[in-house]
Image (cartoon, rainbow, N blue to C red):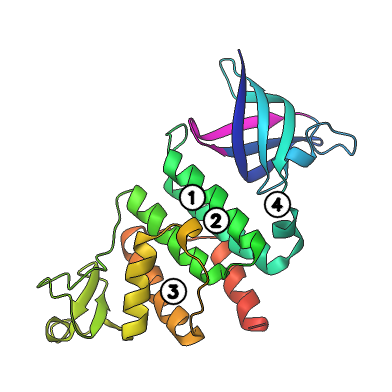
Amino acid sequence: MLSKIEGIVIRTQDYGESNKVVILFTRDRGKLAAMARGAKKPKSRVGAATQPFTLGQYLCFAGNGMATISQADILQSHYPLRADLFLTAYTAYMTELLDRLTEDKEPHPFLYELLATTLSHLEEGTDPDILSRIFELKVLEAVGYRPRLDGCAVCGKVEGPMKFSVSQGGLICLEDARHDSQALPLSPPAARILKLLQRVTPDRLGQVQVKEETKNQMERVIRSFMDEYVDLRFKSRPFLDRLRKEDP
């Protein structure tokens, strides 16, 4: 059965000398694996459309086994995301996060739109750290992990300075933080921006400028939350960290 599928390439794997297994993230079918025969050959008709981060339309034949891509058209190549090492690293991290936290063939229309708009904003020059925090928060929420960022996770207080408690799963006021020696420091701007990022999508972000110290605090608390509740080791994250350390 032939089907026309719109999707974004989030991962590829070489298969034999000339073939590739392509992992597409689609709007209606979720994560889908398809074989692209001959995609590694220089004159392949589907080679360009099966590059990482490409948004394309794929004509797939689905039988009893893995689908096979018979034809492909590029809708957005996102070549700048592959040409710039930093953008490649950020995009690889976000697509790996999506890949690791979603199941095969489980539709997530919202996450598909989130990925598509995030890639476009990355390409247009929006701060990749801010986009990464939005992406993390939205993906986490979609799969059932939502840190509480609208007030103290213990008493509900919404005003005043806050810290972040991994054990409580969100912000805690300074009074309750006295009972959590592992609570992470968080400046008022960092707490306020995290709350905002949990509510917005990239297309509603607008122009944003955030101090490096604030971005570092936000990254630390979200990573700590993820490491505690998701407990996955991402291959792309150490590479991204190394790049930023070598060339801040």
Q: Nearer the viewer, residue 130 or 69?
A: 130
Give the number of the mark in front: 4 or 3.
4
Answer yes or no: is residue 227 visible.
no
Q: Are marks 1 and 2 in contact (CB under 8 Å)?
A: yes
Q: Secondary structure at mark 2?
A: helix
Q: Are marks 1 and 4 in contact (CB under 8 Å)?
A: no
What is the CA distance from the residue labelled 1 to the residue labelled 4?
15 Å
Q: Is residue 49 above or below residue 195?
A: above
Residue 14 location in percent, x, y? Answer: 72, 41
Q: Where, quadrant-wise, is the C terminus in this rendering?
A: bottom right
**Residue at 51% from the left image edge and 64% from the top image edge:** 131
Q: Are marks 4 and 3 in contact (CB under 8 Å)?
A: no
Ranked by sequence position, the earlier of labels 3 and 2 is 2
Q: Which amino acid, mark 1?
A: Leu
Q: Is residue 34 magenta?
A: yes
**Residue at 81% from the left image edge and 37% from the top image edge:** 17
The numbered mark at residue 219 is 3
**Residue at 29% from the left image edge and 50% from the top image edge:** 144
Q: Which amino acid, mark 2?
A: Thr
Q: Which amino acid, mark 4?
A: His
Q: Where, quadrant-wise, is the N terminus in this rendering?
A: top right
Look at mark 2 in the image and give the residue it sits on.
118
Look at mark 4 in the image and give the residue it sits on.
78
What is the CA distance from the residue labelled 4 to the residue labelled 3?
25 Å
Answer yes or no: is residue 223 visible.
yes
Q: Which residues are magenta?
A: 25-37
Ranked by sequence position, the earlier of labels 1 and 4 is 4
